[in-house]
Amino acid sequence: MWGVIPAAGRGSRIQPLAFSKELLPVGSRTEDGVERPCAVSEYLVERMIRGGADKICFVISPGKSDILEYFGDQYGGARIAYVVQPNAEGLCDAIFRAACVVGDTESILVGLPDTIWFPPDALSTLPEVPLSFLLFPVEHPELFDAVVLEGNAVREVQVKHDAPASHWVWGAFRMSATGFRELKSLWQTPERQDEYFGTLVNAYLEKGGTAIGVQTGESYVDVGTLNGYRTAMTLLLSEKNRRSPLFRRWSQTRARSGHYGACE
């Protein structure tokens, strides 16, 4: 399975930085007894690997070679590839540019590299269906893409709606190989070329496509603002304090097998 990470955005909400926003230090990890900073995008990479991804594709802009230098060609047992998005033309363009690498025969996980969310294994709850969203409850859904459900079926995605009908927002999603092909084909029709994934999904649903929402997310923070950065640090501290011995044993097993220690 592939994990696709759109990382071509400028990060204007948290500038000025001397590096790509995806490398913003948030929290830390311990390697060989030495604690070091953890880049915010590492949280998503680790969650994708726990969700079943064994290959990661970063979609970057031409000026973000520091991401390539940071991650190289492998992370925690997953191979890494890079695709360039020449211009910032939205999430849909970023996702479907990855098609030249990921092909159309494997499932795909998609997440945002400037977010931190829990539980860390939530992606493993997304089923092998054409499209499934990992949903999180938030206080201000109007700032995100709110997902309106009927049962667990997605009825509508409300993109930054002033008065959304749901306080559940998507934080990541999974597409089967079939779902990826269908959504990509719809996006490429002359009348579409959506910038936002939510508007494309709404058109997909109107044409008879199906999607489900999985409400296993617990907490979700957008680290792309200064306030979000502060909130993320508080969240990481609280999660670290309540982690179970089972999580610590999982981290130790990763370390013994040659994987990095988990970001925390």
Image (cartoon, rainbow, N blue to C red):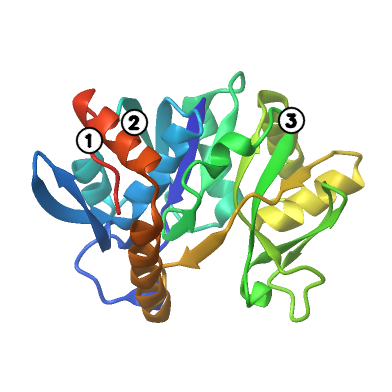
Quadrant of the image containing the C terminus? bottom left
Residue positioned most to the top: 105
| Front residue of this view, candidates 169 and 60 | 169
Q: Looking at numbered disc 1 in the image, what kind of residue is underneath it?
A: Gly
Few, some or many C-alpha atoms within 10 Å of disc 1 (few <14, some 14-19, many ≥20)? few
Distance from label 2 to label 3 (Cα)? 25 Å
Q: Is residue 22 visible?
A: no
- Left or right of 43, for residue 26: left
Q: Quadrant of residue 199?
A: bottom right
Q: Are marks 2 and 1 in contact (CB under 8 Å)?
A: yes
Where residue 3 appears, as percent x and y from the top left, is 48, 35
Residue bearing mark 1: 72
Of mark 2 and mark 1, the one earlier in the sequence is: 1
Few, some or many C-alpha atoms within 10 Å of disc 3 (few <14, some 14-19, many ≥20)? some
Distance from label 3 to label 1 (Cα)? 31 Å
Q: Quadrant of residue 145?
A: bottom right
Q: Residue 129 — which label? A: 3
Distance from label 2 to label 1 (Cα)? 7 Å
| Front residue of this view, candidates 116 and 6 | 116
Q: Is residue 64 visible?
A: yes
- Left or right of 255, for residue 177: right
Q: Residue 115 — which label? A: none
Where residue 166 appears, as percent x and y from the top left, is 78, 68
Residue bearing mark 2: 80
Of mark 3 and mark 1, the one earlier in the sequence is: 1
Q: Residue at x 90, y 42 (%)?
A: 207
Q: Residue at x 25, y 34 (%)?
A: 252
Q: Looking at numbered disc 3 in the image, what kind of residue is underneath it?
A: Val
Q: Residue at x 42, y 50 (%)?
A: 86
